[in-house]
Amino acid sequence: MLSALRERLELRVARTWARQLPPWVTVHPVQAGDSMLDLDPGETEAIVLAETLRADLLLMDDRKAVDAARARGLTVVGTLGLLVRGAQAGLTDATALDRLRATNFRAQERLFQDTAERIRQAR
C-alpha cells in the first residue's frame, strides 16, 4: 500500500510525506493480495493487511472496496467519517474539513454539508 501511495499521489506534500515517514508510522509488508478481490492493488493490500492485523477500523473511501471489506467482516470508515470521529473526540474541528475540500478529494456536496453539520454537533 505504501508503494501505491508513493506512486499514485498527485500532491507534492503527500509524496514528500510518504518519502519521509514520521516515527508513528509502521510499515507492514503485505503478502500477495487476495485474487478473489477485483480491486486496485492498494485497496486489496489494505484489506488483506486489516485482516492480518485484525484491525479495529479500516480507512477506505472507494465504494467497491468498502463493500468488499465489509463483506469480509471489516469495520470501515471513510475520510469524512473519520473527520467526524475526530471532532467527537475533540481532536479536530471544521477547519480540517475546509482543508480537505481544498485538496483533490471528491465527494458529493450533500456529503460535505452533512459532515460539516455532524462536526458542528460534535463540538
Image: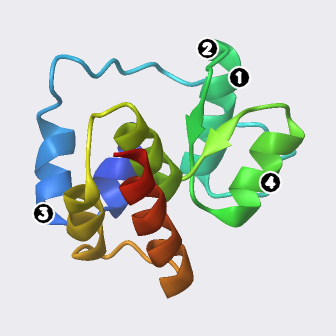
| Residue identified by numbered label 2 | 53
Total numbered labels = 4
Q: Amino acid at mark 1?
A: Glu
Quarter assignment of residue 91: top left
First in sequence, mark 3 or 2: give its number. Answer: 3
Q: Position of residue 12 (x, y in %)?
A: 12, 63
Give the spatial CA distance, label 2 vs label 4. 19 Å
Residue at 81%, 42% (x, y): give it. Answer: 70
Q: Is residue 1 visible?
A: no
Image depth: mark 1 or mark 4 in front: 4
Q: Position of residue 26 (x, y in %)?
A: 33, 17
Of 32 and 58, the residue lying toward us: 58
Quarter assignment of residue 100: bottom left
Q: Secondary structure at mark 2?
A: helix
Residue at 30%, 34% (x, y): give it. Answer: 90
| Residue identified by numbered label 3 | 12
Of 122 and 71, the residue lying toward us: 122
| Residue identified by numbered label 4 | 67
Q: Residues within 10 Å of mark 1 (few under 14, many from 20)?
A: some
Residue at 24%, 56% (x, y): give it. Answer: 96
First in sequence, mark 2 or 4: give its number. Answer: 2
First in sequence, mark 1 or 3: give its number. Answer: 3
Q: Secondary structure at mark 1?
A: helix
Give the spatial CA distance, label 1 vs label 4. 15 Å
Q: Secondary structure at mark 3?
A: helix
